[in-house]
Image: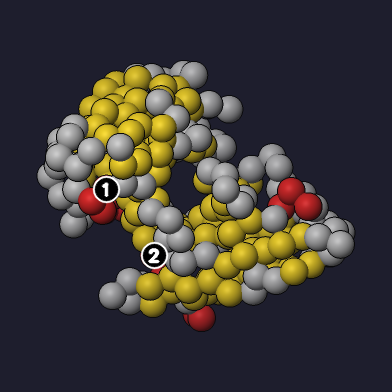
Amino acid sequence: DVQLVESGGDLVQPGGSLRLSCVGSGFTFSTFEMHWVRQAPGKGLQWIAYINEGGSGANYADSVKGRFTISRDNAGDSLFLHMNSLRVEDTAVYYCARASVTTEYFSDSWGHGTLVTVSS
Amino acid sequence: EIVLTQSPATLSLSPGERATLSCRATQSVSRFLAWYQQRPGQAPRLLIYDIFNRAPGIPDRFSGSGSGTDFTLTISSLEPEDFAVYYCQQRKDWPITFGPGTKVDIK
């Protein structure tokens, strides 16, 4: 079965840093583009970052550009989100999602999410 | 940025009824439009991609239609597990954007 499992969410002070991880299993991780999507409490979905299969290309939402960095380790079937200069408004559940060629690069599998709380 | 709006914000229906959800884009998204379902406490689940294609394992009571800037998700006969929030998403242009969601709740 395809699985994505996020970890690393925590309570952090404004201005702090955090690294989220997402481990994939049940599929060939290195052949899939990946995304991070977040959801603030009681709010809708917000796409924040994308990385291509090899890790050489990435794209970001303006709200996180320059503060967050997406990366991957295909040998370890892992996706990361390095988050710096965190703000209260970054508080959200963070999901990793894979983009499948089978579904025309829309996200057919999602993790359960990891909660990031930014508060003093 | 392509902005997606969804209507209505909330749809109150009974099991067995037909649900019609709308998604409108500020510019054409070509075929790059998908629908997701999110139940409380769960991750989103892909229902429809490229306007009308059902994702694997999705029952045929879910169907998508539309073109250009106006799209519709139809649930032909609501089952108890269909009461959830539904989001449309475009990937025509960066940034990828989602609509604000339509909540389908039990009347």
Residue for point 70% across, 71% down: A10
> Which quadrant, please, contains the N terminus of chain A?
bottom left
Question: Element at badge 2?
Answer: helix
Does residue B63 show up?
Answer: no
* Observer-nearest of B88 and A108: B88
Q: What element carries label 1?
A: helix
Residue B54 in which image quadrant: top left
Query: The C terminus of chain A appears in which quarter of the rendering?
Result: bottom right
Q: How many labels does the image show?
A: 2
Between disc 1 and disc 2, the foreground one is 1
Of the residues shown, which amino acid type is indicated by label 2? Thr
Q: Residues within 10 Å of mark 2 (few under 14, many from 20)?
A: some
Q: Which residue is drawn at 17% across and 34% down?
A: B17
Q: Which residue lies furthest to the bottom in this view?
A: A76
Q: Residue at x 40, y 39 (%)?
A: B103
Relative horizontal placement of residue A43, taking residue B44 as reference (left or right): right
- Left or right of A70, for residue A105: left
Please tell me whether residue A47 is drawn above or below residue A22 in the rendered image. above
Mark 1 neighbour density, 10 Å: few (under 14) some (14–19) many (20 or more)? some
Query: At x 27% / y 35%, what residue is drawn?
Result: B13
Circle 1: residue type: Asp
What percent of the width, then of the height, locates residue B48? 27, 42
Q: Name the residue under label 1.
A: B82
- Please name the residue that numbered disc 2 is placed on: A31
